[in-house]
Image: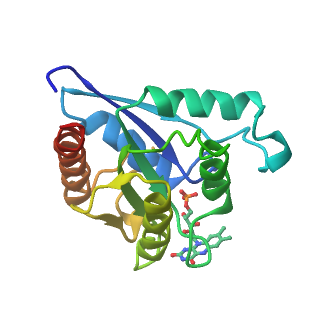
Amino acid sequence: MNSKVKVLGFAGSLREDSYNKMLLNAAIELKPDNVELETFDLEGIPLFNQDQEEQPPKRVKEFKEKIKAADALFIATPEYNYSVPGVLKNAIDWASRPYGDNVFDEKPVAVMSASEGMLGGARAQYHLRQTLISLNMHPLNRPEVIVSQIDEKIDANGKVVDEKTRKKIGKVLEALVAWTERVRK
Ligand SMILES: Cc1cc2nc3c(=O)[nH]c(=O)nc-3n(C[C@H](O)[C@H](O)[C@H](O)COP(=O)(O)O)c2cc1C
């Protein structure tokens, strides 16, 4: 793949000052030159209602179109009660439907998580990875980006300043590009 790799990033948080959105902002800063990274805010996606899956709401249609157009996805998620936030699972459920129009099918995907706690959202990542498999996606195994104590790794403007974390984010994007090329072969 010689042209740019189009990556769509989204965070499993609607919070304006979301740490996970900060990780995606850092990724935009640190991405390799051959990556185009666009982000999508899950704000405005209503609760899933299967009665509407054939004619989904406008925001869901937009989300599905962005996913279809992307070569790979990049998800940054918080951990809620040892699992994936409902906001993220709900958005994934919409975009996986109706049957036969799962826009995640065969997409390579990388995952990161952040929390103020010691485990950095690791448990949510493993629940998320299980869902990604059910969607027939191709999750990147390594490097794992699990950012613990994120509040100590950002500056007053919400920029990720911790060097190790920045390096990891750059590396995972490089690995996602290589993985996308492998999956496409
Ligand atoms: C409903 C709820 C449940 C949470 N459960 C966990 C948890 O199980 N493990 C954890 O490490 N943090 C938990 N947290 C803390 C979040 O990980 C933390 O608020 C994180 O910053 C949210 O991500 P964001 O900054 O991207 O919005 C929880 C927060 C909320 C609001």
Ligand 1: image quarter: bottom right
Relative to 110, is 64 on the left or the right?
Answer: right
At x 85% / y 45%, what residue is drawn? 51
Q: In which image quadrant can residue 151 be found? A: bottom left
At x 52% / y 63%, what residue is drawn? 78
| Residue nearest the observer in this picture, 6 or 159 | 6
Q: Can you name the residue that lies furthest to the front here?
A: 100
At x 49% / y 58%, what residue is drawn? 77
Compared to residue 185, the image places residue 125 above or below, namely: below
Relative to 7, is 17 on the left or the right?
Answer: right
Residue 92: where, in percent of width, then height? 59, 50
Residue 142: where, in percent of width, then height? 22, 62
Relative to 53, is 123 on the left or the right?
Answer: left
Q: How many marks?
A: 0
Image quarter where the C terminus lies is: top left
Q: Can you name the residue that lies furthest to the top here?
A: 3
Compared to residue 55, the image places residue 171 above or below, namely: below
Q: In which image quadrant can residue 118 be found? A: bottom left
Q: Can you name the residue that lies furthest to the right here?
A: 51
Q: In which image quadrant can residue 4 be found? A: top left
Compared to residue 102, the image places residue 135 above or below, namely: below
Image quarter where the N terminus lies is: top left
Residue 14: where, in percent of width, then height? 64, 48
How did the renderer colour the structure? Answer: rainbow
At x 62% / y 63%, what residue is drawn? 85
| Residue nearest the observer in this picture, 17 or 123 | 123
Residue 102 visible, this orientation: yes
Residue 31: where, in percent of width, then height? 25, 36
Residue 158 visible, this orientation: no
